[in-house]
Image: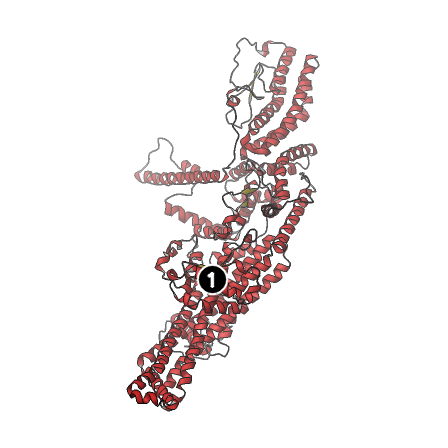
């Protein structure tokens, strides 16, 4: 069972028990516990019998429980024994039983129903004619109303469940057309044609009026006729009360009692013959599948031997050598044979079994006849015969990767609506996961342990076949059913190993899978530094424009130029890289994915025209992947790569913007060095802005280093190590998915809270860099325009007598005045202070969230970014203040003192006990804070 199904069942159970709001842990924790402790349940007759007895001993209605169990067992209900085993364990849990009983009573009261059994309610009614008071009538009316309410609810639920189950089991089969005369001629049968309740021939003499010898001869002739499905004169077949009911007979009551007793002993043979013949004629139809047809053919072979016995008895009767005692003696072995055949037929009929379910039923019948060697041999013959068409389908699947299942009986089901061409279009793994799937209801019991290998073997060979390669399995042998050695499992494992090896060699060697994934890492994970820098330099002006004004062809041209003029030119797969402008930013994309199939999904169906995205926000790489590499690098994997790229690419852009401040202001600084002798106000501009810029740059660079080296490179090394020892394609898919998932998780792309804070921090950095760049550019403009204004006032004489020192003095004076004006402005000081406070607040919020998340989930990877940003304890004091404030507030709330509160500034005094050290758990209560 997959993790998704387990999580779904746990959530449904919490909802049914009313524990969703009260449970502090959540379904995720229970799901992980179940997955870690899940073991396959091996059914044995001893364990099932003990569990059944234990439940029967603890229930108030053991007879009804056992009858229901036998009925379900006869219908071959799957997972019945594991369910009974689970219920037997629950009977020992008194606390669980009390909780379930209380919950059921509360639910019944809310619905206005009762849990009292129907018979107990009716038994409490007064006797007819009894006088009742008004109060007693009111009580009886309330009881009956509750009972009436409970019945329709249960009935409708059962009907709905049955309808849904039948809808799931409905098979899509193409049944050939059959002629009408096949159904319009009732005499085309080996069974009794029409049953009646009384003799139709009035001229028949009662047997009691004949001598004993004539009675015996007449009844023997009737017995031999009934053995062939023909009514006799004195033994008549009754009409069937149900479709699969056993045939019943009427005997002339005037027959001698001793002969009548012998006849009654022999009539079950005729009844079993009728059951088997009806089964053969019904299950030979197309709609019941190849397995039932093969089983019917095997039974028909045994019926032929049975008819030979009947012919021999008739011959002896004509010779006058046959008596009822001899008939009883001769049919003894045949009675056991037909009894087993009728039991098999009844089991298949009651369970409406088809395909693999029939084989599972026959396997259990064969295994259950351990003490009866002849009976087990007979069931083994039936099982082997029924397995022939099923194993032919299996052989084609595991040896050639082809499904030839005209009646939907095989355990592997093909979904033809999902094609491999959609791997590059749809955000899912539908082709590999859903094109071929296991239908659990069709798995024979003896193939359950190798069902996954059967599925994967055919899937591997199917991929190879779709690549145009011939498949010749060197170990292709006929598969035969055996009860003890089970050699078929070895053949299946051999075919699985061969298919895994061939497909893995095709992907890894011929299609160069690792080289392609490494090529994607160069571009999507910014592995080629010179290419990324060159591409960002070339496309800088394009990225600033709105998405509607950008020409994708121009971006493609610039990408081609960057690839050809960088070290990426040696990559043989560089031509598969493409440019894509997505209609949503990274945050929207993340929430669109996280809210798939949830109630919040419709909230993120945003019109792309409402977002007003720039080229930088919408830009991403795309990659062209062809079959069969698209099995591994499908659209879902490409989307993960794109999310990582957009995150890293934007961080790189922020770093470039902050570094550009230094480049621009450096020019102002060089031109302003001489101005320091005129004014000291400009120092405030440099000290405040440059200090904040350095803190921002330190954060961005350390954050990039953490993602590139401690996340991506670390997980890439693990991925490469795993790929060196990979043995099948499923492991390749799992390792590749784990690599991407771990990168997304450790880069905070799967945690919306952390990603929002990081995004806000980046926005603060970009806004700050734009603000400083505008100021620096305006100062540079003043420096360039100052001399021109000065020269225009001096006239023609100053133009003829320019001096370098005077020009420099004029320049520095203009810049000094401009910078002093900016430094003295209250708006400028307030703006820088706001940037500083916002950045500090968000950064501390990020560090605190990381600490909380790491302490709760036990993940230590995020601690690396915490240590890297706070390597010298710069933020520790501020984090300690926040921790001390929260701890004090919790302590004051718990004691209800309410006296005093901690200051909210970072420089506030705090108790020594409220220490917040990165990597350590924060204290829940401050010691001695009162």
User: Looking at the image, which residue is at 63% across and 15% down?
Assistant: 221
Of residues 560 and 547, the one drawn nearer to the viewer in this rendering: 560
The part of the image, by quadrant, that contains residue 736 is bottom right
Give the labeled residue for mark 1. 557
Badge 1 density bin: few <14, some 14–19, many ≥20, Cα 10 Å: few
Name the image quarter holding residue 397. top right
Q: How many marks?
A: 1
Q: Quadrant of the C terminus?
A: bottom left
- Relative to 642, say whether 455 is above or below: above
Q: Is residue 1 left or right of residue 399?
A: left
Residue found 49% across the figure and 69% down from its top: 534
- Helix, strand or loop for disc 1: helix
Apparent side of residue 553 relative to residue 464 in the rendered image (left or right):
left
* x then y, percent, for residue 129: 35, 30
Is residue 402 at all visible to an observer of this figure?
yes
Looking at this view, name the residue that lies furthest to the top.
203
Q: Is residue 905 left or right of residue 13?
A: left
Q: Position of residue 227 (x, y in %)?
A: 62, 20
- Residue 857 appears in the picture as rendered: no
- Residue 53 placement (x, y as % from top left): 57, 42
**Is 499 in front, or is 96?**
499
Pick the residue in front: 78 or 147: 78
Residue 116, position as x, y percentages in the image = 42, 42
Foreground pick, 301 / 884 = 301
The answer to whether 281 is drawn above or below residue 862 in the figure is above
Task: Give the left or right position of residue 121, taking residue 280 as reference.
Answer: left
């Amino acid at each position: 069972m997959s993790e998704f199904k387990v999580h779904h069942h746990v959530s449904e159970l919490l909802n049914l028990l009313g524990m969703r709001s009260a449970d502090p842990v959540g379904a995720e924790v229970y799901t992980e516990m179940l997955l870690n402790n899940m073991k396959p349940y091996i059914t044995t007759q001893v364990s099932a019998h003990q569990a059944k007895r234990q439940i029967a001993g603890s229930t108030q209605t053991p007879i009804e429980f056992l009858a229901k169990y036998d009925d379900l067992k006869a219908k071959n209900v799957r997972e019945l024994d594991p369910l009974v085993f689970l219920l037997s364990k629950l009977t020992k849990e008194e606390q669980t039983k009390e909780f379930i009983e209380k919950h059921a009573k509360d639910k019944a009261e809310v619905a206005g129903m009762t849990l009292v059994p129907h018979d107990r309610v009716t038994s409490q009614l007064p006797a007819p004619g009894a006088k009742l008071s008004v109060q007693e009538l009111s009580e009886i009316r309330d009881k009956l109303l509750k009972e009436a309410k409970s019945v329709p609810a249960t009935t409708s639920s059962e009907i709905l469940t049955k309808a849904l189950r039948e809808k799931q089991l409905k098979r899509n089969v193409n049944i050939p057309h059959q002629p009408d005369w096949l159904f319009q001629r009732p005499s085309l049968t080996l069974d009794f044609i029409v049953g009646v309740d009384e003799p139709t021939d009035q001229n028949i003499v009662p047997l009691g009026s004949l001598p004993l010898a004539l009675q015996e001869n007449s009844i023997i002739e009737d017995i031999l006729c009934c053995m062939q499905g023909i009514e006799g004169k004195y033994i008549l077949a009754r009409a069937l009360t149900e479709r699969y009911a056993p045939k019943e007979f009427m005997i002339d009551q005037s027959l001698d009692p001793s002969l009548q007793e012998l006849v009654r002993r022999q009539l079950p043979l005729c009844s079993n013959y009728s059951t088997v013949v009806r089964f053969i004629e019904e299950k030979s139809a197309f709609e019941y599948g190849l397995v039932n047809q093969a089983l019917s053919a095997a039974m028909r072979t045994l019926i032929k031997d049975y008819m030979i016995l009947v012919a021999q008895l008739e011959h002896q009767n004509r010779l006058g050598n046959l008596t009822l005692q001899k008939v009883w003696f001769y049919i003894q072995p045949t009675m056991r044979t037909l009894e087993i055949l009728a039991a098999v037929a009844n089991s298949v009929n009651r369970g409406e079994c088809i395909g693999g379910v029939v084989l599972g039923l026959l396997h259990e019948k064969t295994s259950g006849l351990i003490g009866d060697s002849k009976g087990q041999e007979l069931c083994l013959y039936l099982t082997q015969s029924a397995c022939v068409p099923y194993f032919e389908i299996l052989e084609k699947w595991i040896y050639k990767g082809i499904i030839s299942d005209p009646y939907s009986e095989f355990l592997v089901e093909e979904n033809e609506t999902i094609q491999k061409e959609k791997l590059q279009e749809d955000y899912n793994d539908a082709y590999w996961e859903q094109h071929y799937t296991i239908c659990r209801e069709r798995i024979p019991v003896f193939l359950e342990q190798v069902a996954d290998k059967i599925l994967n073997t055919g899937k591997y060979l199917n991929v190879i076949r779709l690549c145009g390669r011939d498949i010749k399995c060197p170990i292709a042998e006929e598969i035969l059913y055996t009860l003890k050695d089970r050699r078929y499992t070895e053949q299946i494992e051999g075919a699985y190993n061969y298919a895994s090896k061939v497909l893995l060699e095709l992907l890894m060697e011929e299609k160069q899978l690792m080289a392609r994934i490494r090529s994607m890492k160069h571009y999507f994970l910014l592995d080629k530094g010179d290419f990324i820098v060159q591409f960002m330099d070339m496309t800088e002006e394009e990225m600033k424009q709105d998405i509607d004004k950008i020409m994708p062809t121009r971006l493609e041209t610039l990408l081609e130029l960057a690839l050809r003029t960088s070290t990426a030119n040696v990559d043989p797969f560089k031509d598969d890289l493409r440019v894509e402008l997505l209609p949503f930013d990274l945050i929207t994309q993340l929430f669109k994915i996280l809210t798939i199939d949830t109630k919040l999904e419709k909230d993120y169906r945003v019109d792309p025209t409402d977002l007003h995205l720039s080229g930088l926000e919408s830009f991403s790489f795309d990659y062209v992947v062809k079959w069969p590499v698209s099995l591994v690098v499908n659209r879902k994997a490409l989307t993960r790569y794109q999310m990582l790229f957009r995150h890293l690419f934007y961080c790189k852009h922020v770093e470039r913007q902050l570094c550009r401040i230094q480049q621009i202001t450096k020019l102002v600084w060089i031109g302003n060095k001489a101005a320091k002798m005129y004014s000291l106000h400009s120092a405030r501009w440099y000290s405040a802005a440059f200090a904040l810029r350095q803190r921002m740059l330190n954060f961005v660079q350390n954050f990039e280093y953490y993602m590139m080296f401690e996340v991506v490179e670390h997980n890439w090394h693990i991925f490469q190590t795993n790929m060196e020892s990979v043995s099948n394609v499923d492991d390749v898919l799992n390792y590749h998915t784990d690599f991407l998932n771990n990168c997304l998780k450790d880069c905070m792309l799967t945690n919306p809270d952390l990603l929002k804070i990081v995004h806000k921090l980046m926005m603060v950095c970009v806004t700050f860099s734009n603000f400083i760049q505008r100021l620096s550019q305006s100062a540079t403009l003043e420096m360039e325009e100052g001399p021109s204004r000065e020269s225009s006032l001096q006239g023609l004489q100053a133009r003829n007598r320019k001096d370098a020192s005077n020009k420099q003095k004029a320049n520095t004076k203009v810049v000094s005045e401009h910078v002093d004006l900016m430094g003295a402005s209250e708006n400028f000081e307030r703006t820088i202070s706001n940037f500083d406070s916002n950045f500090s607040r968000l950064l501390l919020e990020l560090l605190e969230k990381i600490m909380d998340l790491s302490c709760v989930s036990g993940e230590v990877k995020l601690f690396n970014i915490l240590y890297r940003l706070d390597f010298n304890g710069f933020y520790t004091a501020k984090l300690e203040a926040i921790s001390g404030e929260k701890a004090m507030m919790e302590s004051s709330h718990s004691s209800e003192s309410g006296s005093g509160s901690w200051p909210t500034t970072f420089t506030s005094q705090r108790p020594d006990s409220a220490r917040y050290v990165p990597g350590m758990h924060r204290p829940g209560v401050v010691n001695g804070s009162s």
